[in-house]
Image (tube, coloured by chain):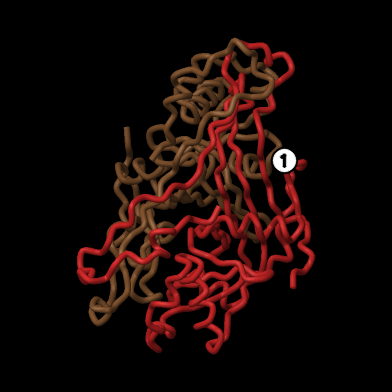
Chain colours: A red, B brown
Amino acid sequence: MTRAAGSTQRTRVRRLSARGEYDPASIARVLDAQQVCHVAYVVDGEPRIIPTLYIRIDDYVYLHGNRQAALLNHLSAGGFASLSVVSLDGVVVARSGFHCSMNYRSVVVFGQGEAIPDDQRAAILDAFVEALVPGHQAVVRAPTAQELNATAVVRLPLNEASTKIRTGPPSDAEGDIDADVWAGVIPLFTQVGEPQSSPDLRDDVALPDYIKNYRPPA
Amino acid sequence: MTRAAGSTQRTRVRRLSARGEYDPASIARVLDAQQVCHVAYVVDGEPRIIPTLYIRIDDYVYLHGNRQAALLNHLSAGGFASLSVVSLDGVVVARSGFHCSMNYRSVVVFGQGEAIPDDQRAAILDAFVEALVPGHQAVVRAPTAQELNATAVVRLPLNEASTKIRTGPPSDAEGDIDADVWAGVIPLFTQVGEPQSSPDLRDDVALPDYIKNYRPPA
């Protein structure tokens, strides 16, 4: 199902290009580790940036939102966007300030938006719910016609995308290795707290297993 | 030291505008809770997006990187950019798919880049190290002339910025409150793992307290 992902002028990794990869499996893996992306687009020659939820299905990234939102109108009309996702994996503590950094996995996608037809919108919105909280989609009511009409769904193809990943210890300069300075990595990860029931939740609705066992994508 | 932050066409919160705020203290607080931003800019009419480390000092956001990086050249030359920072605080589990969401704190900044003069660059780079790992700047060697020459530092003013924040339980529709569906919030936060010493660390360099006690900004 995956098309070859391509490197172009717009997505080629220029700085530290040893960290860049273009294969579809790597791109999918990095995208599937997060739920929120940033999308950049151009309005009257000026950059705009918006954080938003996304899901990946096969070789597309899907976005949704209010039908009147400027970004969704732009992408529905076939406008271009650049989309980025980052997972932060650790603080890289080097012997010099110059080599201090972070470990991360990132994807940048460049592409032209495409509106999802009305009759396919409900299925994608269901997939958004299931991606956000696996198990929840099966128990919520179906969207109303009004909710579906208020919501736009668009997608960007993944055929112009690249990943950039940093892992491992600091890359200190040869002459700094013997310095009397601790060097290494402090790992970072997303942790889940105790679920907080809504104040207006019916007293007899128990915490379901799929909420108890919820773990964020990683 | 803070100027009034302003709402303009470019940063005004349009969707769910009750969530938007423009006061400098809120903007600083949301910026200070993260270390990595996304920056959008325009090249030949097309959007580009890049994740990068940042620090806030007074009413500016500072970025740094390789002097040859396209984004830094663009901003050093006074180019415009839109910058966004997001902290994800929880998964909002509603009784309907439509009201499922996330709790978050976000900032969007629009502004014109400004190069930091050579004689002020070292102080800002020191501040980057200290922000990344508080306590570490005091023990690393000073940057070399070569390192300083390889690095550009730019800043964006915060006078055109806005925050958008969602907190609290789901906002379910009146008619859904009594549904037999769990609703609430699953809190998310960044956790620190056990520090991993570099494989080439001298055996007699102990783990310092400032690494043991490291906590990410929140």
Q: Secondary structure at mark 1?
A: loop
| Residue A164, horizontal then vertical, whole percent | 68, 47
Q: Is residue A63 or residue B195 the one in the foreground?
A: B195
Judge left or right: residue B47 versus residue A127.
right
| Residue B214, horizontal then vertical, whole percent | 44, 28
Judge left or right: residue B181 versus residue A34.
left
Residue holding disc 1: A15
Vertical placement of A19 versus A41: above or below?
above
Q: Is residue A77 or residue A102 the one in the foreground?
A: A102
| Residue B54, horizontal then vertical, whole percent | 51, 38
Residue at figure coordinates x 69%, y 20% from the top left = B200
| Residue A159, horizontal then vertical, whole percent | 73, 66
* Res A48 seen here: no
Residue at figure coordinates x 43%, y 84% from the top left = A148
What is the three-letter code of the residue carrying label 1? Arg
Q: Quadrant of residue A208?
A: bottom left
Q: Is residue B156 or residue B129 the one in the foreground?
A: B129
Which of the image's four quarters has the N terminus of chain B?
Answer: top left
Q: Quadrant of residue A23?
A: bottom right
Vertical placement of A149 versus A104: above or below?
below
Judge left or right: residue B129 versus residue A208.
right
